[in-house]
Image: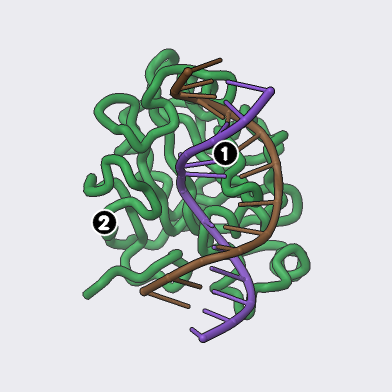
Chain colours: A green, B purple, C brown
Amino acid sequence: MRPLDRAFYHRPTIEVARALLGKIVTHGKTSGRIVETEAYLGENDLAAHSARGPTPRNRVIFGPPAYTYVYFIYGMYECLNIVAEPDRVAGCVLIRALEPLDGISLMRRRRPAAQSIEDLANGPGKLTRALAIKLKHNGVDVTRGPILVSAPDREEPFQIAVSKRIGITKSPDLPLRFDIKDNRFVSRTLPK
DNA sequence: AGTTCGATCGCCT
DNA sequence: GGCGATCGAACTG
């Protein structure tokens, strides 16, 4: 299993958000398969942190692709994004849910509230806690580590379900959330 | 310098 | 379904 190269992320954000489904995030002894993502665009997307231009917090979104954008939210949780698009073009992908693979017992210790394997990393704040991803990991190169994103040795085919992004108040109706269809590790199941 | 608010989660009803 | 926790960043003046 090899990390994806920088060219993988050097394309439109929506393409990257879809292509990241099924890939593996690794941090230390823990890893998980990406089952849910959201795209945050550089233009015409008021929900994106990059909407009002670069600031000290969000500047990595405007830089070259394949770097993490990690931010702190609600006084308690970190959220993990991967930067897409060429240098100087904003765009990133929020990782919203993982299927736990390695280090499950360690994840359980980090997430004592989780009552099942499904609950371990089925939300953006849960997965950063399960993988011990913190604010200090902002700007990490995911082709180099310590946080890595890789293609699995064997990838089963799957369908992608598209829906609206979760928990935002601006630009709420854009179809920019992507799930592995019917996967039981996603953060919320879609209405039928 | 003060205020507002948020890409969430877990517990309560 | 509703809400409180908890705090950094961005905005206001």
Residue A140 in view of the camera: yes
Crowd rating for badge 2 (residues with CA inside 10 Å; few <14, some 14–19, many 20+): some
Residue A8 in view of the camera: no
Left/right placement of residue A132 relative to residue A33 reads right
Q: Nearer the viewer, mark 1 or mark 2?
A: 2
Tag 2 secondary structure = strand
Task: Residue type at mark 2: give it.
Answer: Ser
Q: Disc 1 or 2, which lies upstream in sequence?
A: 1
Tell me how many marks there are.
Answer: 2
Left/right placement of residue A177 relative to residue A114 reads left
Q: Residue C5: give x, y in percent of width and height.
A: 68, 59
Query: Residue placed at 60% from the left, 75% from the top?
Result: A117
Label 1, on which residue? A3
User: Marks 1/2: CA distance?
Assistant: 28 Å
Q: Which is more toward the observer, A54 or A28?
A: A54
Q: Chain of mark 1?
A: A
Query: Residue placed at 31% from the left, 29% from the top?
Result: A12
Tag 1 secondary structure = loop
Task: Residue type at mark 1: give it.
Answer: Pro
